[in-house]
Image (cartoon, helix red, strand yellow):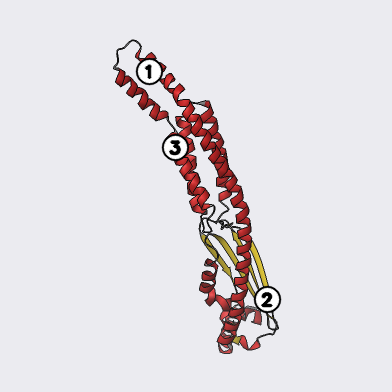
Amino acid sequence: MISLPKSMTGYAKVERLSKEYRISCELKTLNSRYLNIELNCPSFLSSREIELTKLIQRYVKRGKVSLRLFVEFLVPPTEALRIDFGLAKVYYDGLEELVTKLGIPEPVNLDHLLRFRELVKFELSEEQEEHIWNICEEVVEEALRKLDAEREREGQQLSRQLRTIVEGLSALAEKLRETAGDALPSLRVKLREQILQLLSNAQIDANLFENLIAMSLQKLDIREEIDRLETHLSKTMELLSSKEAVGNHLDFLAQEILRELNTMLSKSEDVGLIDLALRGKVLISQFREQVQNLE
């Protein structure tokens, strides 16, 4: 099977259920110029964010990645709840004194104390945290594999569409070369007539006259642009068979192809060449729109 670039967009969700936990991972990727990772996971796993980021980077090279990791405890870990009763007493006494001195009619209650987040903490033992992390890591990697498979499928469809466009551009390049070659003799005659009209009856050296025509033809000759266009198209087709992240490179090549077509338009006087170059611009515009979705 031919390796192809992947799409930047995808979605995957994996859930694992045991007697103690329900763990689920939801992954979503969108288009982005660079790799941008957003993590949403339980606070007790915040120390694992670097590991999660590295895990994602093994599968995704470019795009916006949103990961949501959920851990539900089916057996309440009551021993993990830590309440700082001493600090709670200090806050309570302080609030009571504040209420009394300011004459506030509302009494101090539990809701007031719970606003101080440091009073109640959820802390798992190292063994529990490691056990949960091991399961989470497996779930996240399974979700990444599913995401990768979906992005590969979409990448295949995109690559087929892009190849069709490139094949159309290659056919246009052949017609441009043929038309440009056919147009040169008539262009030479036209230039000769224009120069003779400008010079009227003035005497001019024959060699100088031919050199002047050659220089003028060179400025209107688009064969060099066609050569570069075909080189860019060949490289584009090569990248469309790569399994690497080539989206940025393909976008750059599309800009270069557009540049060559614009140069041809500015240099051409032949109606057939102008029509072909304009058709090429339409195709490369479609290519650039589609290539934004590739990693």
Q: Label 3 belongs to which residue?
A: 225
How far across and how far down the image is residue 172, in percent? 54, 37
Q: Which mark is residue 135?
A: none
* Label 3: element kind: helix
Q: Residue at x 41, y 20 (%)?
A: 191
* Label 1: element kind: helix
CA separation, marks 3 and 1?
26 Å
Q: Residues within 10 Å of mark 2 (few under 14, many from 20)?
A: some
Q: Which mark is residue 16?
A: 2
Quadrant where the image shows the C terminus: bottom right
Q: Residue at x 46, y 44 (%)?
A: 231
Q: Nearer the viewer, mark 3 or mark 2?
A: 3
Whether residue 235 sits left or right of residue 206 in the image: it is right
Is 180 placed above or below 81 here?
A: above
Q: Nearer the viewer, mark 1 or mark 2?
A: 1
* Label 2: element kind: strand
Q: Which mark is residue 195?
A: 1
Q: Residue at x 57, y 40 (%)?
A: 168
Q: Can you tell which quarter of the image residue 142 is in?
A: bottom right
Name the kind of residue labelled 2 in the image.
Arg
Q: Are marks 1 and 2 in contact (CB under 8 Å)?
A: no
Name the kind of residue labelled 3 in the image.
Glu
Of the pair 279 and 23, the residue shown nearer to us = 279
Whether residue 85 sits left or right of residue 196 in the image: it is right
